[in-house]
């Protein structure tokens, strides 16, 4: 990058002109004066690229230079910041990001997959060249959670990071509850509405949200991004029955990300959990995102906002751009990347209460048999509710005292031998939020 | 300030060793390694001052130089940042802040009154000397709302800023509701618990929260701080009856700050408002704070956390200290202070629905008379609820369509002439959140 004075325009090259890219263009055009006043220098777009030049887009792009190729764009002499909004963690997005850094540009990206898979290598490359990569838009859409965690809470030892960070999953779970519809029906609705990624497993399998959690964990605990260590479980097995029964016991079911450093290593989970219905996480409905940051001084900070969409995501991209325009530069993950170590993954999650649902035969002593099996596995019962039955069996809900997933699984494995439990019991962790 | 390299220790001088000051000392001592790793340089305390040197404090202060006088501390050659935690908007806090800036130090402060009254002059002084003042701890305790508004949302035109920013008021209102106790009783409880300022009107009169709102408005709308323009109304007139009746209509009563730029000028209000019980603001209980930031791209961002206390406030102070240690420096209010203009205050708030409670005589046609008076004042009724009565009169609750406070007041002035309304009607704005 050519040396620029503090007041020279900051010049952007934007790769990817989908929803978010066009959102960024609109902000730069609409708020030129405001951005200049806040940054102390103009923010301009110099050049753009996208897959299809001829596509009709909802913005006037005629004054920007066009490139057919993102790598060529990334290396242009007349850009200071490469804004990567193409997506995908291999191929052009990665190639162009590397090319931009090597050409002396800073990078702003919304690409959670890229960072989850290659964040450590890209951060080391950027910092070895005196550049940085910013990615507020990659996690929780418009919520400035990266900035809050890296900067606002920089005086805290972070204890736990939690979040509902896939709006599509939260939409599906909320819709199932509100409309009393089964998962498959709502899944198809969401697909028809265009809420799902081309590969829906990225959403409902928890992968997209897992990417985000791994990024937050790296910042929070000062370790390398370790997406492969995230325990992933999607929402496909959640039934409308469980949502209702959990509700009866005072809980909501969320696809909840949790990262915490334990005595036995870093725990990272993106799995369905029960949370109290009256907690901020429990009250979250629809496509909104929420992150919960817990620090040893600050206590609990809850951030809530839109997790996707043109405006919110473009807002996050522009927050990063404005920081660069103002000369705010930090290491990619808040500490120098070459000093970060790979975390030791915790083999088992720390103990928690569990919600168990099982279908109990109408036989004398059935409940006592179940309690005995649970007790022998080391699982003790905190609360229980048995429903009336029209048939020969009835659902029983159990909230356990704190226990481990291993103990719960051992109990479930031992239940068939009692001959009083029908079908497969359901067990879901209750996260204490 | 002597020139320092990027890796030299950042040296703090702390004035004020109350709860927050000691909280900062504890963080610097406990997290020395973590702070150094994150900032790329050590953060150290060099010198301290407080009113009483001999007081027993919950921290080892023996390695810090002691000054009897804050101004002398502020000017010491061996500090880079003056941390002002004394409080008070005149006298030592102001004198020492000015002295620090003139001696080439940056300032970190938790003093909302100082900024609300002298923020513009202090910002101009700081920026003319190439220094800055940071004040995350002055607004909403541990919630990084200053950073979020100034930096994270820098790409947004801000539409509205709202907040419950006085934990004591929210505690009192929540406690009245939960325990069914009148205001005076809960006020005395809060005083006995040490929740109230020495001058309780700072809390319950809305002044403290008004200071915070004026600071947020200046950042949000790019104007000078204009605390004198804030419409202030405390919670002293809120009755347990209103809390209950509002609840019946689906609302909670909050001391709510609202700032928005309207076509007729800047509106700043810190007044009791009704908000939907199911909204994040409505769900906020106890001493917790919440700020709601609305931007033209990001939509609505909600931030929730502890609004006071040693840890949360010290966390905010340290966030500012860490920014300075990392070399992040911005104008005090996000734009150069000498370019900010005083805002034109909006004379009247933009229209909103209102909640009215009045006591109606048990006479034929009474309700029709009230409706006629309201209609003549231009106030139309959206919803109404009349309660059964054991006596000769009964409470009536009315939710109006959007109207102005002037119209509501005109209607209330005209009601006595109907001779069917007993006592003084209550009118509270319903904020659409």
Image: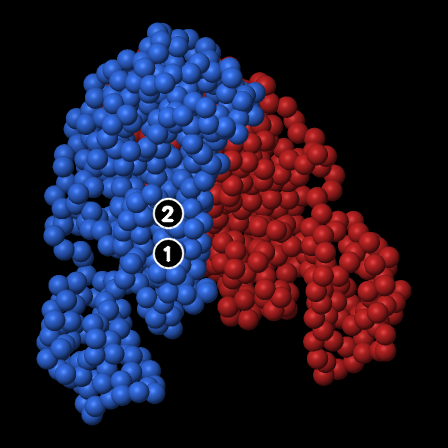
Chain colours: A red, B blue
Does residue B161 appear anywhere in the picture? no
Above/below status of B295 relative to B76:
below
Residue furthest bottom as drawn: B364
Above/below status of A196 relative to B409:
above
Query: Which mark is on residue B187?
Result: 1
Residue furthest front as drawn: B54
The answer as to whether the residues below labels 2 and 1 share one chain is: yes
The chain letter under disc 1 is B
Residue occupying the point 33% across, 23% down: B107
| Mark 2 burial class by Cα count in 10 Å: few <14, some 14-19, many 20+ | many
At which x and y percent is residue B423? 21, 75
Label pair 2/1, CB-CB below 8 angstroms: yes
The chain letter under disc 2 is B
Residue occupying the point 78% across, 49% down: A406
Of A329 and B102, which appears nearest the observer? Answer: B102
Q: Secondary structure at mark 2?
A: loop
In whole angstroms, how far apart are the C-alphas of marks 2 and 1? 9 Å
> Which residue is under mark 2?
B196
């Amino acid at each position: 990058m050519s040396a620029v004075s503090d007041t020279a325009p900051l010049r952007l090259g934007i790769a990817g002109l989908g929803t978010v890219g066009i959102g960024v263009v609109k902000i730069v055009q609409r708020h030129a004066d405001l951005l200049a006043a806040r940054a102390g220098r103009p923010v301009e777009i110099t050049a753009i690229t996208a897959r299809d030049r001829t596509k009709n887009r909802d913005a006037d792009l005629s004054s920007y230079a066009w490139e057919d190729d993102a790598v060529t764009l990334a290396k242009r002499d007349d850009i200071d910041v490469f804004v990567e909004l193409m997506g995908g963690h291999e191929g052009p997005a990665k190639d162009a990001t590397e090319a931009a850094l090597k050409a002396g540009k800073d990078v702003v990206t919304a690409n959670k997959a890229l960072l989850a898979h290659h964040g450590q290598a890209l951060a080391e490359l950027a910092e070895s060249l005196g550049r940085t990569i910013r990615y507020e838009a990659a996690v929780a859409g418009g919520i400035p959670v990266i900035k809050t965690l890296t900067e606002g809470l920089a005086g805290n030892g972070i204890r736990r990071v939690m979040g509902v960070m896939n709006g599509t999953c939260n939409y599906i779970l909320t819709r199932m509850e509100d409309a009393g519809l089964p998962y498959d029906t709502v899944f198809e609705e969401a697909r028809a509405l265009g809420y799902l990624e081309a590969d829906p497993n990225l959403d409902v399998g928890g992968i997209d949200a897992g990417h985000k959690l791994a990024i937050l964990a790296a910042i929070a605990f000062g370790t390398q991004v370790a997406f492969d260590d995230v325990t992933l479980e999607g929402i496909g097995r959640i039934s409308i029955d469980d949502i209702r029964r959990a509700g009866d016991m005072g809980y909501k079911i969320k696809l909840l990300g949790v990262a915490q450093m334990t005595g036995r290593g870093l725990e990272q989970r993106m799995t369905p959990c029960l949370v109290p219905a009256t907690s901020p996480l429990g009250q979250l409905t629809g496509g909104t995102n929420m992150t919960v940051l817990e620090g040893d001084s600050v206590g609990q900070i809850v951030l809530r906002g839109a997790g996707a969409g043109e405006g919110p995501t473009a807002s996050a991209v522009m927050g990063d751009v404005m920081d660069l325009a103002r000369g705010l530069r930090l290491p990619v993950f808040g500490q120098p990347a070459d000093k970060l170590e790979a975390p030791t993954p915790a083999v088992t999650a720390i103990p928690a209460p569990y919600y168990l649902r099982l279908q109990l035969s109408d036989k004398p002593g059935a409940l006592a048999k179940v309690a005995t099996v649970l007790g022998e596995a080391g699982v003790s019962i905190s609360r229980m509710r048995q429903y009336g039955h029209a048939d020969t069996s009835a659902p029983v809900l159990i909230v356990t005292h704190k226990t481990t997933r291993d103990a719960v699984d051992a109990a479930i494995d031992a239940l068939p031998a009692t001959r009083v439990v029908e079908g497969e019991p359901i067990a879901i962790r209750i996260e204490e939020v």
